[in-house]
Amino acid sequence: MRPASAILLCLIAAASAYKNPYYAPGRSVNVHLFEWKWDDIADECERFLGPRGYGGIQISPPNENIVLWTYNRPWWERYQPMSYKLVTRSGDEQQFANMLRRCNDVGVRIYVDAVINHMTGEPPENLGTAGSTAVFNQWYYPAVPYTQADFNWPPCGINGMDYVNNAWRVRNCELVGLKDLDQSLEHVREKIVDFMNDLIDLGVAGFRIDAAKHMWPEDLRIIYDRLHNLNTAHGFPANARPYIYQEVIDYGGEAVTREEYTPIGAVTEFRVGMELSNAFRGNNQLRWLTSWGPDWGLLAHSDALTFIDNHDNERGHGGGGWMLTYKEPRPYKGAIAFLLAHPYGEPQIMSSYDFLDSEVGPPMNSQGHIISPSINSDGTCGNGWICQHRWRQIYAMVAFRNAAADAGINYWWDNGSNQIAFCRGGNAFIAFNNDYWNLNQNLQTCLPAGNYCDVISGNKVGNSCQGKTVTVGNDGRAIINVGANDYDMMLAIHVGPESRL
C-alpha cells in the first residue's frame, strides 16, 4: 500500500501537470488574436510578437465549422463544429502547420481554442468550411463520424435557474441549442483525443477548453491524461504536458464551480476582469488592491488564467456587460497595466476587431474571406482591426513583466485613495493615478541609480526617451509625476533595455 504522503504528492503533481504554459525563456503574456488568419499570425509572430517579448497566442478554433451566410458569417459560427478537419476561413492544415513552425521558431507559443463540448445547433445552412455536410435532425456528422448515439440523449435545454441549482442539466443538456456530446463515451473520447493530439504533434503548446463547465471534470481528466507530451521538435522540454486553461464562468452562487476544475488544469478567472474593471472605472479605490490575489476571493495563483476582457464578455456575452474594453481606452489601459504589473496569475490580453453589432464577424470581403490587418506607419492596425497588443501602453507592459520576472511586490505606496505605486523586487516600478488631482511624490522605486524612460508615455529610441524621463537617486528614490489629466494614468520604469537609459 502506498503511504498517504506519496498519494498526496501524486495528486499534487497531477494537478499541476497542465498548469505550465512553457513559454520560451524570458517571455510572458498570452494574447488572443481573435479571428486572425494563420498566415497573418505567422507574420505577426516574426515582425512584432517575437521581438516584443510576447509569450504566446490564443487562436480561434482551427477545426471545420458551419458556414452561416444567413447571419452574415457571425463570429460565433467558429464555435459550431462540423468536424475536426483543420480547415476554416483562417486557413488550411498546411497553413496552420506553417504558422506553428514560424511562431515557435521565434519563441511564441500557440494555444488552441478547443470546442469539444458540442457540435452545431440546428443551422439554416448545411455546409462546413471544409465542405462537410451533416443531418442535423438525426445528430449525424459523417465527417467525424458522430451519430445520435454519441450525444447526451434525450436532448434537453438549459434554463437560467439550472445554472443555480442543477449541475446535471448544465453538463448534460444543450448549451443554447448546440448538440451536446457525451464525453463519457469511449468513441467520443477517442475522437476528441485524436483531434487534440494531432494539434500537439503539429506543435501547439496547449488549449483553452471552451465551455468546460458544461462537461464533467472526471470526463475531461480522462481526455487530458490521454494527450501526448508537447513536441520537442518545436523547442519544448522533454515530458512537458500541454497547458490547459478551462472556460468556467463563475461569479459565485452557481451549481457548477471553478474549484471543481482546478485539480485537472488552470481555469479562466473571470472575477479578475470584473474587479479590475470596477476599480479602474473609479467604483472602487485603487488602494484596496494592496491585497490583490486570492484574498479577493480569486483562485490560487497557479490555477488562474487572468484577463480583463475576452471575445465573449467584450460583447456582453459570457457573463459580461460591465467589463472594460477597447471602447474605454484610458481606464482599459490602466486595468491591463495593473494586470501585467502584478505577479498574480497567468495573464492574457485581448486583441479585437472593431464592432458595433455584437454578432458581427471579423472584417471580410463579399466572398466572406477575412481581410488581413494592415499595419499603419505608427505601428497600429487598420482595416477594422483594433490590435490592442500593438498599443504602446500594452506592449510596454509586456516588457515590464518580462523584466520583473519572478520578483514579488515590495514598497507598496498609496495615498489612501486612488494613487498607488509599487516595486517588483529590484527590477521594476509602476505608479497609477486615478484621482482627480496630480500625483507628485518622492517614492522608492527599488531600481539602481540612473535615468529611465517611462515606457508608458513614450518609447525609448536609441539613448533618448520620447516620453517622461525619471531620474533615480543612489537611494533608489525618484520624483514621480502622473497628472490627473495625463493621457495615461500610469508611469512604469524597469531595468530592461526598453526603459534603462
Image (cartoon, rainbow, N blue to C red):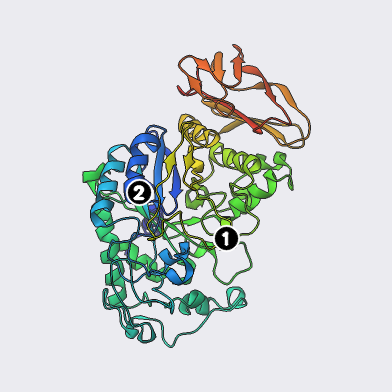
Q: Nearer the viewer, residue 319 or 168?
A: 319
Specify the amino acid type for callout 2: Ile
Dot in front, 2 or 1:
1
Name the residue located 64 percent from the left edge and 33 percent from the top edge: 488
Q: Earlier in the sequence, mark 2 or mark 1?
A: 2
| Residue, disc 1 | 357
Q: Is residue 407 left or right of residue 457?
A: left
Judge by depth and name the residue closer to the eye, 71 or 5: 71
Q: Residue furthest left?
A: 233
Determine which residue is flagged by label 2: 110
Residue pictured at 68% horizontal, 43% vertical:
280
Residue 145 visible in the current orientation: yes
Q: Secondary structure at mark 1?
A: loop
Residue 449, position as x, y percentages in the image: 56, 13
Q: What is the distance, in whole Å, between disc 2 and disc 1 at their CAs?
A: 29 Å
Vertical position of residue 125 compared to residue 330: above or below: below
Q: Residues within 10 Å of mark 1 (few under 14, many from 20)?
A: few
Query: Looking at the figure, which quarter contains the N terminus?
Result: bottom left
The relative height of residue 266 versus residue 71 in the rendered view (above or below) is above
Q: Position of residue 17 (x, y in %)?
A: 36, 53
Question: For the residue marked with disc 1, what is the amino acid?
Answer: Asp
Compared across the picture, whether 406 is left or right of 100 comes to right
Decide if residue 228 is in sight here: no
On residue 106, which mark appears?
A: none
Q: Residue furthest front?
A: 366
